Image (spheres, rainbow, N blue to C red):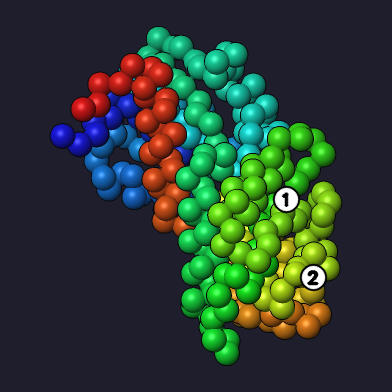
Amino acid sequence: MGEDFSDIALIVLGHGTTKNGSSALPVLQHAAELRRRRIFAGVHAAFWKQEPQMNQVLREVKAPRVLVVPLFISEGYFSHEVIPRELGLDADFRLQTSDFRLFYCRPVGTHQRMTEVILARACEVVAKHPFPRAPKPKDITLFIAGHGTERNENSRKAIERQVELIRARQLYAAVHAVFMEETPRIAESYRLASTRNLVVVPLFISDGLHTVEDIPVLLGEPERIVKQRLAAGQPTWRNPTERNDKLVWYSTAVGTEPGIVEVILERVREAAESLGNRSA
């Protein structure tokens, strides 16, 4: 028999923002796919910075068990500190009410299956834009780009862990982590690259402000050009672009990869087992 989570309401939680409409799309996309599979009592999308927010969604839940899977990259400031505190979770990231038991799962971005998601995105962008022909991974330096923050040292750990895992596979000539707000910076990619071909994969959930505007500028695309393309509804980075005698492929955010749904389900399985799962 297949999995049965019919007594569980699943909440896919995203950061959200009112500054960019596309920020919510991965959360809505993955929640819709999980809803289509009909294995939960209900599947809801919720956000920290936009509607519908967690408290609003929790009022609509009609199931004895609630699992919240944060669609975040790392166990950082928001996912590991702010949100659990505001939800009133205990030290085990749980909440017991008269209506349900809630368990807050670990972020999707720290799961080991994210390695496959990143590799799929890196392979896809080169295959879609071969010029003059697609280089082999051995002729590519792979960069995993993250935000980085000094607020929480865990923010960069998820990215550095993925670099270690991919580097160990020896698929690429080299693999590096680069950041927007920590060192090494994204702009240093050209100096760090050991090959003419670079592939930059942003380890972000959505194609929002950072991935669509900030990172292309940090990679050397003039801000004026980026804004013009954005206004025209065009991709803000053209693959591949030649910069500093390098050819650079830049992918969309990993959070939009369909494989994220399977990572969410892995987090559900982990939590359901710890709570006492009825699934067959």
User: For this view, does 216 lie left or right of residue 166?
Assistant: right
Image point (56%, 54%), residue name: 169
- Element under disc 1: loop
Give yes or no for contact between labels 2 and 1 (Cβ–Cβ under 8 Å): no
Q: Nearer the viewer, residue 217 or 267?
A: 267
* Residue 53 x %, y %: 53, 36
> Which of the 4 image quarters holds residue 245?
bottom right
Which residue is tagged 2?
190
> Which of the 4 image quarters holds residue 239?
bottom right
Q: Residue furthest top?
A: 98
User: For this view, does 78 lie left or right of residue 270?
Assistant: right
Image point (64%, 71%), residue name: 140
Image point (44%, 12%), residue name: 97
Q: What type is the residue that disc 2 sits on?
A: Tyr
Q: Nearer the viewer, residue 197 or 65?
A: 197
Q: What type is the residue that disc 1 sits on?
A: His
* Residue 103 x %, y %: 46, 22
Discs 2/1, front: 2
User: For this view, does 273 lie left or right of residue 145?
Assistant: left
Image point (40%, 47%), residue name: 261
Label 2: few (<14), some or many (≥20) within 10 Å?
many
Q: Is residue 164 above or below residue 74?
A: below
- Element under disc 2: helix
Q: Which mark is residue 96?
A: none
Which residue is tagged 1?
147
